[in-house]
Amino acid sequence: MLEVLKSSWALLLGILLLMVGNGVQGTLLGVRASIEGFSTLEISVIMSAYFAGFFGGSRLAPDLIRRVGHVRVFAALGSLISAVLILFPTITEPWAWVVFRIIIGFCFSGVYVTAESWLNNSASNETRGQALSLYMIVQMLGVVSAQSLLLVGDPSGFVLFVISSVLVSVAFTPILLSVNPTPAFETAKPMSLHQLYEVSPLGCVGLFLLGGVFSAQFGMAAVYATRAGLDVREISVFIATLYIGALVMQYPIGWLSDRMDRRILIMAMALGSGVVALLGVAFAGSYSVLLIVAFLVGGTSNPLYSLLIAYTNDFLEPEDMAAASGGLVFINAMGAISGPLITGWMMGAFGPQGFWLFVAVLMIVLAAYGAWRMTQRAPVPVSELGPYVSVSPAASAVAVEVAQEWAIETAEAEENETTEA
């Protein structure tokens, strides 16, 4: 771990600042949109636009990098993010914010693709797993710490947008001044969605449903909190609690996943998350209960992303794992784009508690589907399970592909040790 920090501290610092900037704007826009009087439908379209842009960026950024190089793409997209962040309080129209969010999503996706390829290049085979874990921790810490910045300015003014813009601009300084020579950028030829579904129906369905849950948390949680009558301090603590739960629960869930039938763990976590979300509906008036619900839902839903990827890998040949990464991210992105839209509709139909109801429905459906799949396929023996690698749902396809490559290397190393024994 120290070796990774020594070789990649500047890159990780830059990523931390990027996540703080992104975390501030994600929550701030939900609060500011409510202040501006945008309808729930308008806000849901605005929030969904980020994920549409993010998906587009993940598809086009590799081609941009091949044409003009990592540094130019990184600097250009970063400058565009900073400029757009300043435009939000300048043009307070829903249609403009939809366009801005598409641009922001596209640019952040391209920035993540570039940063993750640099991080992968700086890690060795022995430290790649540690680098991925540190990357995920830094992402989560950035989003959590971002929530405290909401308290230093008025959401109805310009200051918080300026802070977010400055953080993003400053984030590129340590990265661009310290990166090693840019690596060659290659991605695996993707596996078809039909092939991927044939390999792991539960993995595909689960990642689609989780895309909706994650985008609801990232895009609509602040909108829910505002509609529920929370003040800015309470909103910042509520959003932070979601991600603290995700960070705290990653390790114990990863430890369990390597020692039991992963379908049981997937089903139990999804069912538990769904039931807890229903408590958010039932006890909407208690802030302390709301924080407990946020911690538990965040702590069960976010690690499920890594768990479902690990489960899918259990049915893939090592040479197919990297190729599967693009399909897995695509499926998750489709769920993410639709998540805020459906959440917004449910909040319009059922009030603020439609947020928790949406999460509950998706997680209970996932649990039910997992239970049904257990009747269709024998479990993978624990001795043959592949490694669990922590990957954030906010990461790009590059991080997922790197995780797949690390899983391949680990599987091959274990196979060699077994052969030699």
Image (cartoon, helix red, strand yellow):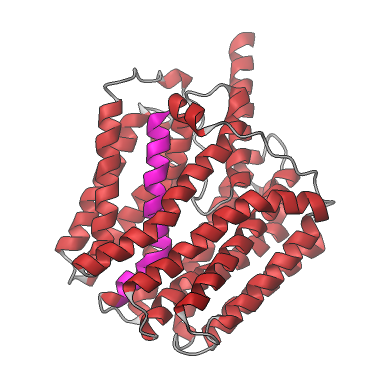
For residue 231, say whether it is visible: yes
Left-right relation of 411 to 363 = right
- Name the main secondary structure of what is drawn in magenta: helix
Tell me where residue 214 appears, x and y as whole percent: 41, 54
Task: Say whether residue 221 is left or right of residue 289.
Answer: right
> Residue 311: where, in percent of width, then height?
44, 31
Quadrant in which the C terminus is drawn? top right
**The residue positioned farthest toward the left in the image shown:** 282
Front position in the image: 292 or 70: 70
**Residue at position x 44%, y 62% from top?**
48
Q: Which quadrant of the figure has residue 284? A: bottom left
Q: Is residue 337 left or right of residue 167?
A: left
Which residue is at the front of the view, 343 or 93? 93
Which residue corresponds to the image point at 57% horizontal and 71% vertical from the top-left?
Answer: 21
Identity of the residue furthest to the right in this view: 181
The single residue placed furthest to the front in the displayed view is 95
Examine the structure image and report whether residue 222 is included in the region drawn in magenta. Answer: yes
Placement of 329 over or under 137, stated as above or below: above
Looking at the image, residue 237 lies above or below residue 323: below
In this rendering, position of residue 9 left or right of residue 237: right
In the rendered image of this protein, does residue 21 appear above or below residue 213? Answer: below
Marks counted in the figure total 0
Task: Indicate the position of residue 312 as horizontal and vertical percent values.
Answer: 46, 30
For the question of whether residue 5 can be seen, the reply is no
Q: Residue at x 62, y 9 (%)?
A: 419
9 part of magenta stretch: no
Q: Indicate the quadrant where residue 74 lies.
A: bottom right
The magenta span reads 200-226
Point out residue 158 in the picture as x, y percentages from the top left corner. Answer: 53, 88
